[in-house]
Image (cartoon, grey):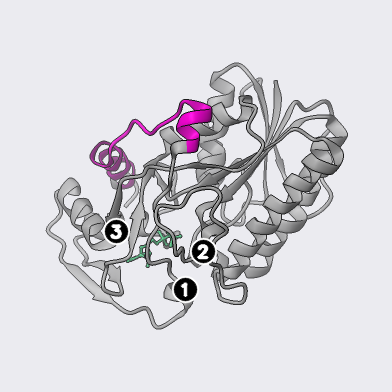
Amino acid sequence: MRVLITGAAGFLGSHLSDRFIREGHTVVGMDNLITGNMDNIAHLMGHERFSFIKHDVSSYIYVPGPLDAVLHFASPASPNDYLAHPIPTLKVGSLGTHNTLGLAKAKNARYLLASTSEVYGDPEVNPQPEDYWGNVNPIGPRGVYDEAKRFAEAMTLAYHRYHGLETRIVRIFNTYGPRMRLNDGRVVPNFIAQALKGQPLTVYGNGKQTRSFQYYTDLVEGIYRLLFSAEKLPVNIGNPVEMSILEFAQAVVEISGSQSDILFVEPGDDRFTDDPKVRRPDISKAKRVLDWEPKVNLADGLRQTVDYFRSRV
Ligand code: UDP
């Protein structure tokens, strides 16, 4: 297959590019590099089946030649990043989704949208099954991401229902691993960097809010299976092991062998506004339709990630 991956220089886009190359496909990577980093795909540059186009998918996209699949992974994905880039975040989820869908339709390619657990907002149901409609504040600081992704899902299904396009939607829960940006502001790089530097780990609020963390290899496997499955409606891909952020901080300290303390802080800015109090995927659908479940436990995944960050701190 010849596959377009938007956001190819990002954390997930680059790992997906690696997977498709490894499976023998040809990958066209696209990224505008506002949060992506060419270092993530440096090893693919010059590969005979990989090419890269620097482009913002919020503007009309031109890709010469045939395409069999379009995977739309371009977007800022850290709360810090969408606070810093609110309008590009809205545009890549809305205009970027429209443009990539239009491209997929023109090329008669299968389409896969990277959606998010953020479509559930601050959920009143835990764990979250795909048929939960969510609890999103449209006008809060996270709304630029959440609403863009909700619009993206609606647009993707409209292209499926109206144009008959083959579409897939993955709702990605918190994912971590090598190639996350050390300073992207999310909890995994923040805590690991703090632990490695011997600084206190900054737990926001009382640390009782929960998340469920999956290692990127599990996610990539789920996405690969979803693309080749027959499932048109959204599928959650995440690790259902839920823990409080305080417990997560303790796990990072232990696994990195750090002496760091844990510090409770109240970010005075928008970083903590509308922070979801709980998050955990219901993965019964992924198990049923993809025969997928996560394989990597937190200790193993964190060790790999700590090793990666250790070489960079
Ligand atoms: N968080 C924290 N300390 C940090 C960064 C984040 O306690 O230095 C918390 C944040 O408030 C949230 C959780 O960790 O409850 C996950 O935040 P992240 O930014 O990784 O992504 P989110 O899951 O909110 O999209």
Left or right of residue 187: residue 248: left
Residue 115 x %, y %? 59, 49
Left or right of residue 15: residue 74: right
Q: CA distance from mark 1 to mark 2?
A: 8 Å
Q: Nearer the viewer, mark 3 or mark 2?
A: 2
Residue under the image location 60 percent in, 16 percent down = 24
State the quadrant of the N terminus. top right
| Mark 3: C-beta under 8 Å from nearest atom of ligand 1 | yes
Lower position in the chain sequence, tag 3 or tag 2:
2
Amino acid type of the residue that numbered disc 2 sits on in the rendered structure: Gly
Residue under the image location 47 percent in, 66 percent down = 122
**Label 1 residue SS:** loop
Residue under the image location 79 percent in, 47 percent down = 158
Label 1 environment density (alpha carbons within 10 Å; few <14, some 14–19, many ≥20) = some
Label 3 environment density (alpha carbons within 10 Å; few <14, some 14–19, many ≥20) = many
Q: Quadrant of residue 185?
A: bottom left
Please tell me which residue lies in front, 198 or 75: 75
Q: Are marks 1 and 2 in contact (CB under 8 Å)?
A: yes
Lower position in the chain sequence, tag 1 or tag 3:
3
Q: Is residue 77 visible?
A: yes
User: Which range is magenta?
Assistant: 285-309
**Above or below, comparing residue 146 to residue 267 in the picture:** above
State yes or no: residue 199 in magenta.
no
Q: Which residue is mark 2?
A: 121
Q: Which residue is mark 3?
A: 191
Residue 143 x %, y %? 59, 69
Residue 11 x %, y %? 50, 44
Most common secondary structure along the magenta stretch? helix
Q: Which residue is mark 1?
A: 274
Q: Quadrant of residue 160?
A: top right
